[in-house]
Image (tube, grey):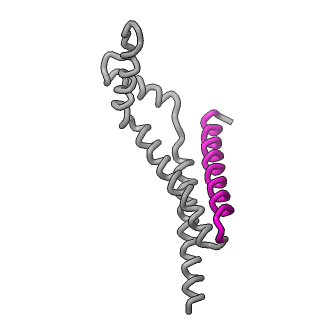
């Protein structure tokens, strides 16, 4: 198996493990065990994984490189000798871009697991709503 496939599988596995742990913890720690609680249990990891995956996508585009450069320069100012590794923010950004090309981060598995959790959440919420509506009639 190639390194790319292994990285994708690790990303899927970690996302699934995080989602499963969050769902099980929420569901079993809540006093009411019904479809509404299970729906809420899927909402938490779904929203978290989609949000984290979205931020990872934004990070990969280099949007935060200027902020990273400013913190890098701040830390560099406390070092003795003040030797600059990057002359400008542009040099820092180009170095980061090259680093991102060499070592890709696989975001899609995180987004897919989060989206599936949100889909399960919506389906369970609709079923729970129909059960409550049927019980009230």
Q: Which residues are magenta?
A: 3-32
> Residue drawn at (54%, 79%), measured in percent from left and top?
129
> Residue drawn at (65%, 38%), measured in percent from left and top?
6
The reply, left or right, for residue 75 in relation to residue 3 is: left
Nearest the viewer among 110 and 8 is 110
Q: Position of residue 8 (x, y in %)?
A: 60, 42
Magenta-span inclusion, residue 63: no
Residue situated furthest front in the rendering: 31
Magenta-span inclusion, residue 21: yes
Q: What predominant SS class does the magenta segment belong to? A: helix
Picture quadrant of residue 136: bottom right
Q: Position of residue 80 (x, y in %)?
A: 41, 8
Task: Count numbered badges in the picture.
Answer: 0
Query: In the rendered view, would you say 109 is above or below 78?
Result: below
Q: Assign the C terminus to one quadrant of the image.
A: bottom right
Query: In the rendered view, would you say 89 is above or below 8?
Result: above
Query: In the rendered view, would you say 83 is above or below 48?
Result: above
Picture quadrant of residue 39: bottom right
> Residue drawn at (42%, 27%), measured in percent from left and top?
96
> Residue drawn at (52%, 47%), measured in percent from left and top?
108
Nearest the viewer among 116 and 76 is 76
The reply, left or right, for residue 75 in relation to residue 25 is: left
Residue situated furthest top in the rendering: 81
Nearest the viewer among 127 and 108 is 127
Q: Position of residue 58 (x, y in %)?
A: 41, 42
Q: Assign the N terminus to one quadrant of the image.
A: top right
The reply, left or right, for residue 5 in relation to residue 94 is: right
Query: In the rendered view, would you say 137 is above or below 8?
Result: below
Q: Position of residue 35 (x, y in %)?
A: 62, 73
């Amino acid at each position: 198996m190639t390194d790319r496939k292994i990285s994708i599988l690790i990303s899927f596995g970690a996302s699934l493990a995080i989602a499963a742990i969050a769902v099980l913890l929420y569901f079993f720690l809540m006093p009411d065990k019904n479809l509404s609680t299970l729906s809420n249990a899927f909402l938490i990891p779904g929203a978290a994984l989609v949000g984290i995956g979205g931020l990872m996508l934004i990070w990969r585009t280099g949007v935060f490189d200027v902020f990273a450069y400013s913190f890098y320069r701040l830390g560099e100012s406390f070092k003795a000798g003040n030797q600059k590794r990057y002359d400008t923010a542009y040099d820092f950004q180009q170095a980061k871009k090259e680093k991102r090309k060499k070592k890709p981060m696989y975001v899609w598995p995180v987004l897919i697991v989060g989206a599936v959790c949100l889909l399960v959440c919506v389906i369970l919420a609709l079923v729970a709503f129909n059960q409550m509506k049927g019980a009230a009639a």
